Image: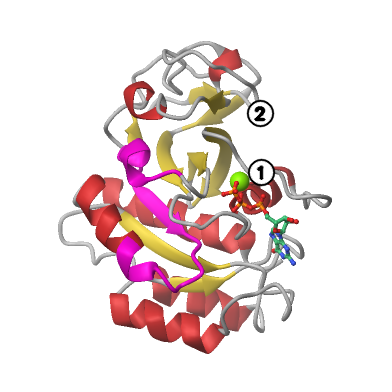
Amino acid sequence: MSRKKTGKGKGSSKSPKASPSSSSSSRDSGRMAKGLAAAAAPTSGLVYPCRPSLGNSGEFYDIAFKVSDAGGDSGVGKTCLLVRFKDGAFLAGSFISTVGIDFRNKVMGIDALKVKLQIWDTAGQERFRSVTHAYIVMLMVRFTCLSAWLTEIHEFTQQDVVVMLLGNKADSTHDRVVKREEGEKLAKEFGVPFMETSARSGLNVELAFTAVAKELKHRTMKEPDEPNFQLQEYVDKEMRTAGCCHS
Ligand SMILES: Nc1nc2c(ncn2[C@@H]2O[C@H](COP(=O)(O)OP(=O)(O)OP(=O)(O)O)[C@@H](O)[C@H]2O)c(=O)[nH]1
Ligand SMILES: [Mg+2]
C-alpha cells in the first residue's frame, strides 16, 4: 500500500469546497459554517488512499478514516477531548461553544500501519444530517437522550456506522453527569461500547481513539475468515492491563 502524506495542525477554511479530501494543506483541517458540511463531506468514511496527499507538513499514512464526535450535548467536552487527543493539552478557561463543524487530523500507529483519523468536531446543537459521512460516531451524551440520539444516528448515517459511547469528565464528581455503572448499564442496553474519559486528566483519551482506529482498520482490512474486532473487549482488557486507566 502506498504511503500518503498528511498535514498537521489546525487550519481554517470557510469554503464549501474545502473538503478534507482537497489537496491543499491549508484545508487539511478547519472550520466550516453550519449547514455546509453535508455538501462538503464525501459520503464515505474512508478517505481514499489514491487521492492526492492532504498536506505538505510531512506525516505519512497508509489509510485514513473519518470519525465524528457528534451526539454530545453542548458542554459535555467534545472539543476538549479532541484537543487533548490531538495536542495533549487541556483547554482550560471559559467555555467557548463550537460553531458549525471543525476537524482535526491525527496519524496513529496501529499494528504495522499508519492510520490517519480525520476527526470532525460538531457543535452540540448540530444534528446528524451533517455527519452522515462519518464511519464512527463517538457519542458523548448526558445519557438522558441517548435513545433519541441513537435513533437519529441510524436514520442519518451509513448502515454500518460504528457508535461508541463516551462518558467524559470522569475526573470530576461535580462535573460528571452520570456514574460509571449507569453509563455501562445504558450502553449495554443499547448495545454500544462504552468507556469513561477525561479531557482534563487525559484518562483513556488515547485508548478511546486507538480502539476506534483499530476497529476501522480491522473492518477495512480483515480477511473473510478472521473474527471481528471486539472493541469493548479490547478497551476492557487494556484498562485491566493498565491497572484501571490510561492517561
Ligand atoms: N472537569 C472536566 N471539565 C471538562 C472536561 N472536558 C471539558 N471540560 C469543560 O467543559 C466545558 C465544555 O467543554 P467543550 O469541549 O467546549 O464542550 P463541547 O462538547 O465541545 O461543547 P459544544 O461545542 O457547545 O458542543 C469547558 O468549560 C471545559 O473546560 C473534562 O474532562 N473534565
Ligand atoms: Mg465544542
Q: Which residue in the protein does label 2 denote?
A: 10
The answer to whether the residue labelled 1 contacts the one labelled 2, judged by CB atoms less than 8 Å apart, is yes
Query: Residue 86 bears which disc, if any?
Result: 1
Relative depth, front residue between 145 and 187: 145
**Which of the 4 quarters of the picture holds residue 167?**
bottom right
Dot 1: within a 10 Å radius of its alpha carbon, few (fewer than 14), some, or many (20 or more) residues? some
- Type of amino acid at the residue the image marks with label 1: Lys
Q: Which quadrant, please, contains the N terminus?
A: top left
Q: Taking 67 as reference, is 140 above or below it?
A: below
Q: Taking 80 as reference, is 182 above or below it?
A: below
Answer yes or no: is residue 138 visible: yes
Mark 2 CB near ligand 2 (8 Å cut): no
Labels 1, 2: front one: 2
Give x and y (percent) for residue 89. 78, 49
Answer yes or no: is residue 115 visible: no
Relative depth, front residue between 215 and 192: 192
Circle 2: element type: loop
Looking at the image, tell me whether mark 1 or mark 2 is earlier in sequence order.
Answer: 2
Give x and y (percent) for residue 46. 33, 36
Image side of residue 227 versus residue 140, left or right = left
Image side of residue 7 versus residue 113, left or right = right
Circle 1: element type: helix
Image side of residue 170 versus residue 135, left or right = right
Give x and y (percent) for residue 140. 50, 62
Stretch in magenta = 126-148
Report if residue 138 lies within the magenta region: yes
Q: Taking 30 as reference, is 125 above or below it?
A: below
Give x and y (percent) for residue 204. 62, 67
